[in-house]
Amino acid sequence: MIQDGPSVNPEQLLARYGETLKQAAASAERTDQALRQIGGEASSPDGLVTVRVNASGATTGLELRAGARGMDPEELARLILRTTQQAQGDVGTKVVETMREFMGEGEGLEFVKSHLPRPVPVAEEAPPAPQRRDTRADDDYFDNPPDVIS
């Protein structure tokens, strides 16, 4: 029998393969631990809303300051949504940075990027002044209703 190259020892091949699997599992565990510690946070420009999210973008915290009580409900909802999107964009950036450390540049990182929220730019112009609700007690409101016709 003629051999063209060095003989392959199946035990050595399996041992190398086993070591490669152990290294991959250890790397996956380090990546998992790093991702579990990542979170994103954003506050609205006026500071009335703060949102925190985990690495997957799920909301883990929502803080509303006292000034939010007088806001129009629709305006408050938009502010919460926008701030949540900014927090999700923040965490997406952090996830990409972490994955880049473990994976390097390449197709794998591009795949991760394609499934994360994009950072939302913070509005450069001041948000419109919030519309204030009439917070008087019902008796006061009906005794002295607001002028609806100017």
Image: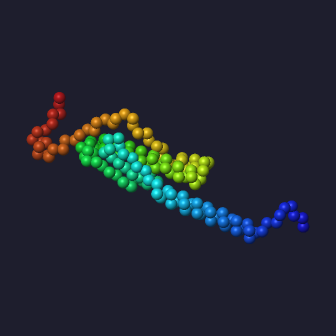
Image quadrant assignment for residue 2: bottom right
Can residue 134 be seen in this snapshot? Answer: yes
Residue 3: image location, x then y, percent: 87, 64
Closest to the observer, 59 or 27: 27
Q: Is residue 101 left or right of residue 123?
A: right
Relative to residue 84, is residue 125 depicted above or below? Answer: above
Q: Residue furthest right?
A: 1
Residue 74: image location, x then y, percent: 30, 42
Name the residue located 25 percent from the left edge and 47 percent from the top edge: 66
Name the residue located 70 percent from the left edge and 68 percent from the top edge: 15
Can residue 81 be seen in this snapshot? Answer: no
Residue 123: image location, x then y, percent: 39, 37
Relative to residue 59, is residue 45 depicted above or below? Answer: above
Locate the C terminus and report the quarter of the image it occupies: top left
- What kind of colouring is applied to the model shown? rainbow
Q: Residue furthest front?
A: 101
Q: Is residue 15 left or right of residue 139?
A: right
Residue 125: image location, x then y, percent: 37, 34
Q: Residue furthest bottom?
A: 11
Locate the N terminus and report the quarter of the image it occupies: bottom right
Q: How many marks?
A: 0
Q: Residue furthest left?
A: 143
Name the residue located 55 percent from the left edge and 62 percent from the top edge: 29
Closest to the observer, 116 or 125: 125
Image quadrant assignment for residue 45: top left
Name the residue located 36 percent from the left edge and 54 percent from the top edge: 61
Q: Is residue 25 left or right of residue 86?
A: right
